[in-house]
Amino acid sequence: MKHKILLSLSLIISCLLLSCSEDELELNNQNAETVSECDLNIVEDTLIALCTDGSNTARPDQVLTISASFYSKGDNPSNTVFTWTISSGSMEILSNESIIDNENSIARSVVTIRLNSDFTGDGVINVLSENNSGSATMNHLVELDASE
């Protein structure tokens, strides 16, 4: 009897572990968008510039990557802090990575966002970029991708 109970428990635990591993694998295999650096168009009299790059359409359960680049004249890009928030749409922030381009005085942030299974569009992702010299904010809109 003990042997049957142990065998049953082992089978249940194995199924749970396998299920979690498959979920993680499924998330890693999502169609993650790749982004490039957006064009800031910095000229001599530019004081502050902010831009975002990434897909503007997505489907439920998709993972998106969105980047923001920030320039603030006369400030060290290492002083820049990016704050990402979701103001509408069923989405969640998974990760945020900062990249510093000291040569061009540009700070960059790359955020990974998962759209939940109940995502229906009208997603708004806000990014606030700030340092000692100033700040800027921008919205990135994500609509439901109806193609297929």
Image: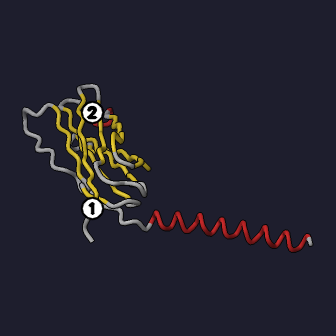
Mark-to-mark CA distance, 1 and 2:
39 Å
Say which quarter of the image contains residue 30. bottom left
Residue 34 lies, in percent from the top left, at 30, 61
Q: Label 1: state its secondary structure.
A: loop
Toward the left, the furthest residue is 44
In this rendering, is residue 69 above or below 3? above
Left or right placement of residue 47 versus residue 140 in this view: left
Closest to the observer: 127 or 90? 90
Say which quarter of the image contains residue 133. top left
Q: Which mark is residue 145?
A: 1
Amino acid on which disc 2 is placed? Asn
Q: Label 2: state its secondary structure.
A: loop
Toward the right, the furthest residue is 1
> What residue lies at 25% left-to-right and 48% top-to-bottom?
141
Left or right placement of residue 49 versus residue 98 in this view: left
Closest to the observer: 54 or 40? 54
